[in-house]
Image (tube, rainbow, N blue to C red):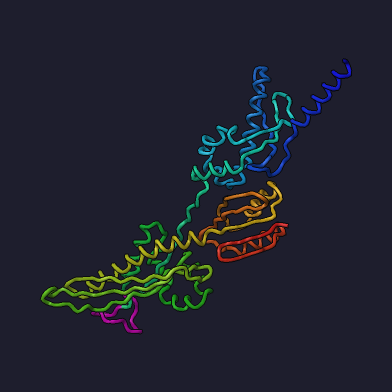
Amino acid sequence: MKSKTLLALFAFFIGSCASTERLKVGAVAGGEVVEAEGSCPIVSGDTRGAKECSLRDAQKKAVEKVIGVYISAKTRVEKAVTIEQNILANTEGYISKYDVIKEGREADFYNTKIRAMVLFQKIGDELKALNILREPSVGLPRVAVIISDAVGSGGKPATEDQTHTHTYAANSMSETLLKNGYKIVDPEAIMTAKAYETIDAAEDDPETMKKLGTKLNAEIIIFGDAKTTAVTMDKNLLGDMKSFRATLSAKAARVQTGEVLQIVSAQASGLDAIDDAAIQKALEAAGRKAGDDLGRELHERLVKNASIALIAVNIKNFDGLENLKKALTATSGIKDLFVRSFGEGAANLDIYLEAAGQTGVQEIAGSLTAKLGATVKRMEGNTLEIALP
């Protein structure tokens, strides 16, 4: 009878051990197992309360680890309140199971170390729902507008020996861009720098463009010309009123590289009893229209150029993804980054660049090759695919 009781107890012990298998750190179906440690002070001898508090703190830190993989430290700080109220206030909802691997009192604190299975994708979905995994805003650059009004006296085309006596189109475009949030170089500074005399050479020589941009403290230069032609109208309809049509064409170039980012053209008419007044109205209207079009299109181009889609494969574990993020964060010119997905050894990240920076796909590929020994598998447009060793 005694031997049967011992055998039954032994069987129960073996079965209990088999049913309480410890979690192992790493990726699992539906989540990631991470280790975290919590700590709480023991107040008025309440060890039990401190124990419960330290467990909650450990769970919170486990969830924070996964949040930290999705977003940068900068975004984590900016969205601290939202994350605290919507995710960290309910950590149990993001942890499917956990093991306490170490706990106990140390001086006046109770410490608990756990290994927790955190629902990685669920946290990602919540961050998206909270609009935290969004595209960050791109800072609008400082722009110098150099548009020549190629108009002679009486509305006739300007001859080669005539200087630029007015810049109606340039001033109108500058005002429009300023209203749309761009920083504008003062027209007087442009005149002082003799930019109108230099811009033709700068168009063909990136170094001259760079020097001019440095002198004007501009990140983008918009250059081109505006011309006017008289419009013949029926005198019975207009009487003594004069009509002129202005045609403006311009390019927006990045100062640091000379790269043309955008091309714009616009037409507009001006009506007045005096030729010069009608010409001025036409040029100003063309400048406003071009400024609206260029301002919108340029911003869209800057947003597109300021982001890179990174596909990384052969990521062995959670720590490998963390190392990739650290390498990217330490790369000059990166403004922010988000992990869009992670699973089965592969991650998709969105990398956002400083709007006026020179960092691009090639620079990031070189940085990851040097820092992590990554192999470039594909580099196409704003997409980079790498394999970690």
Residue occupying image coordinates x 62% and y 49%: 342
Residue occupying image coordinates x 48% and y 56%: 138
Report whether 204 appears left or right of 23: left
Between 189 and 185, the residue placed more toward the observer is: 185
> Does the segment drawn in magenta span residue 158?
yes
Report whether 359 appears left or right of 287: right
- Image position of 370 with respect to 211: above or below: above
> Does the segment drawn in magenta span residue 202?
no
Q: Residue furthest top?
A: 1
Q: Quadrant of the C terminus?
A: bottom right
Q: At which x and y percent is residue 307?
A: 53, 58
Between 38 and 380, the residue placed more toward the observer is: 380
Snapshot quadrant of residue 373: bottom right
Q: Residue furthest bottom?
A: 160
Q: At which x and y percent is residue 261?
A: 47, 68
- Image position of 138 with respect to 294: above or below: above
Question: From which residue to which does the magenta span run?
Answer: 151-165
Snapshot quadrant of residue 173: bottom left
Report whether 48 appears left or right of 79: right
Residue 192 in sight in this render: no
Give the number of marks.
0
Q: At which x and y percent is residue 62?
A: 64, 37
Residue occupying image coordinates x 44% and y 68%: 262
The chief SS type of the magenta part is loop
Residue 163 in sight in this render: yes
Q: At which x and y percent is residue 171?
A: 34, 66
Between 285 and 116, the residue placed more toward the observer is: 116
Between 112 and 73, the residue placed more toward the observer is: 112
